[in-house]
Every structure is written in structure tokens, then in C-alpha cells.
Image (spheres, rainbow, N blue to C red):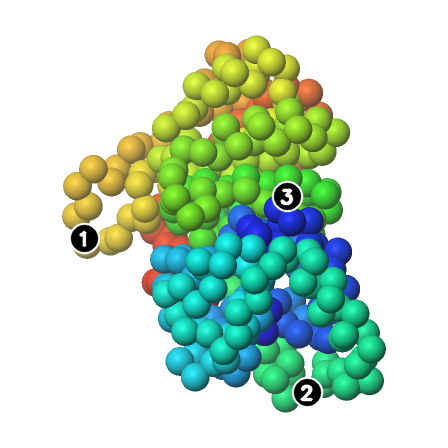
Amino acid sequence: MLFAGGGAFFSGAAPELEKFVDVTSIPFYTAPMSRGLVPEDHAVSFQGARSTAMRESDVVLVVGTRMNWMMNYGQRFAPNAKIIQIDINEAELGHNRDIEMGIFGDAKAVMAQLLEIAQQRSPDFSGALESPWIVGLREANEKRMAQTAPLLNSDQTPIHPLRLCKEIDEFLDRDAIVSVDGNEILHFGRQSISTYLPGHRLNSGVTGTMGVGLPYGIGAKVAKPDKQVLVLHGDGSMGMNAMEIDTAVRHNLPVVTVISNNEGWTARTPGKRKPGRELGFTEFDRMAEALHGYGEKVEDPAGIKPALDRAFSSGKPAVVNVRVEPTAAGVSRSWGGSRME
């Protein structure tokens, strides 16, 4: 498998990576802030089988990313996996995890060389899409999708976060920029909202800092005013920088913020007391209106897309405040007969 990160993005290696994956049919994954280096609807994109791929890969090509805490210091890959690492920082080669081969160089330059070799040997990759390895990942991905389908399509109220994510994913343009910030919603969104272009998915990254969602969205709208920019916040993380709505209004930046409002920090666990967890249903939509933006509250899943349409059509900084199921947990807990990868 291939795993790429920030070094690949900042070197502009996305075209080489996509062509390399096209030729070789090697399954690919990225660090969270590097999603979209290869479009996630590619034939070898199996986002629901990420952990399976990492556990089972015998060879891993790591392109421009540190094996830091987000990768469990390299331990997410199988213990016997042979790792080939490309990095522009020589000190990162073999750091935290022994590797089979280190390539000291710019990700774009090295991937261009590997692509040339792969193209010369393209007959070696014929039939790869039907190999047991690819078929197994495809089946694992399809199983995950089948497990989550009931919640993705659920009409329950309060709304399940996966249904919210599905509606957002279906509504957005292919080149939309999405900034996701929070806890439960960060993880639900990770597996249910796709990214197709490099630099079009933003989150707190390695630092894990909450509260960055709306500020990132404002920056994205300044950088690319012609693109849809949607910020997906949890209500807790929204509270950290909610007054940036005022910044967006004053600078006429029509960023749309959707709040997955579960009335508190993390998910509510029935029968378990969580001191400080409960925040109540904060009416951020009314706050947006008070600041001369657009605000709307949604409590029925059928109303999500119409609310998004009105928010984007308003031409103002907008908040769509969605009441979601408080007990829905996205991190290492069972949900809908499945577990997060």
C-alpha cells in the first residue's frame, strides 16, 4: 500500500501520486490533512478498510509523512511489513520505526522517477484490480458500507451524525473545501465525507487543536473565494471560536458552518456520569443572525439539504445548527453494528 502525507502535498506531488496509483493499482491512504492527493472515488480507494490494509500490507511506500503519534509511531503497519520511506528530511527516515529502504529526496521528484519506472513495467500490473489483495480490501470496504448504511440513511430524530455527513457529502460540489473540527463529528466525517482534490480537506492535524475549524474556513474562503467552503463543527469546538462569525461578516466572507450539536463534549453515555459534559443545546443559529449572518436550526434529516441550499444562497456567513443524537459515539466504540476503522 501507499501512504502519503504533508510532504507530498507541499511538494506538489499529487499528479505524480495519482498517475502512479493509476498505473500500479496500489491501494492508497493519506494523513488526515493530506486527503485528496488522490481522489477518494478512485478504483483502489478503500477508505472503509484502512485499518485492514495497514494490518495486512507486506510492503508500504511512505511518501512525505512522519511516523508520529497519529501513526502510532509506525506501529499501525504490520510488524513484518517492509517499509520504503521517502522524505525530504533525512532525519525522518527510519525515525520511530525501522525501515527496509530510505529515499532522501523531494516527494514530487522521487515519485516522478518511480512513475517513469512503473510506466515502463506497466504489464507487470495487469490484472492487479482482481488480485486477492485488492478483492479482499474491496470486500472489506463494501462490508463496512453495508454496516453503516442503516445509519447513513436513518430518519431518526435527533438526527444521527452519519446521516448529517451523508447529506453534506451529497450536497457539496466536487471541488468544495471542507474544514472539520470537533470530537465525535471529526471521526464520523472522516469515513463518510469524501475529498477529491489536494488541500481541500482541513482539520486540526498533528497538533489536535480544537477550535480551528471556523478560522480555517475563513482562511480557505479568502484563498479560494470561488469555491464552496463548508465548516463542520461539533458544538463544543464551535464554542471556542464562535465569535469568528463576526470576522466573516465584517469581511464579507460567506463561509457556511454546519454544527453537529449533540449538546455537549463527546457523546453522552447512558448510565455513566461525565462531569462537565453537558452544554445544552446552544442556539448558534440565533447568534449568527444577531451578528448579521444567516442562521437556521434543523431537527429533521429531510431538512438538511434544503437548509444547506438556503445557507449558501444567502451570500452571507451562515450557521446551520443541526440537533444530533447525543449518544452517538464515533471513536473506538460500537455504532450501527460496526466500529470505526
Q: Position of residue 31 (x, y in %)?
A: 52, 56
Identify the image quadrant of the N terminus.
bottom right
Contact (Cβ within 8 Å) of mark 3 with mark 2 = no
Q: Position of residue 266 (x, y in %)?
A: 32, 46
Q: Considering the numbered disc 2 on the image, is that residue within a helix, a strand or a loop?
A: loop
Q: Which mark, by number, is residue 272?
A: 1
In this view, the residue in front, 311 or 58, is 58
Q: Which mark, by number, is residue 27?
A: none
Q: Which residue is mark 2?
A: 131
Residue located at (71% from left, 33% from top)? 227
How far is mark 1 from mark 3, CA to CA? Answer: 38 Å
Between discs 1 and 2, the one toward the N terminus? 2
In the displayed structure image, the side of residue 163 where residue 227 appears, left or right: right
Contact (Cβ within 8 Å) of mark 1 with mark 2 = no
In this view, the residue in front, 133 or 254, is 133
Q: Residues within 10 Å of mark 3 (few under 14, many from 20)?
A: many
Q: Which residue is mark 3?
A: 200
In the displayed structure image, the side of residue 120 where residue 279 appears, left or right: left
Q: Considering the numbered disc 1 on the image, is that residue within a helix, a strand or a loop?
A: loop
In this view, the residue in front, 270 or 253, is 253
Q: Residues within 10 Å of mark 2 (few under 14, many from 20)?
A: few
Question: Would you say residue 101 is visible in this rendering?
Answer: yes
Q: Quadrant of residue 120?
A: bottom right
Please state which amino acid type lies under the numbered disc 2: Ser
In the displayed structure image, the side of residue 64 where residue 68 appears, left or right: left
Please state which amino acid type lies under the numbered disc 1: Lys
In this view, the residue in front, 29 or 259, is 29
Between discs 1 and 3, the one toward the N terminus? 3
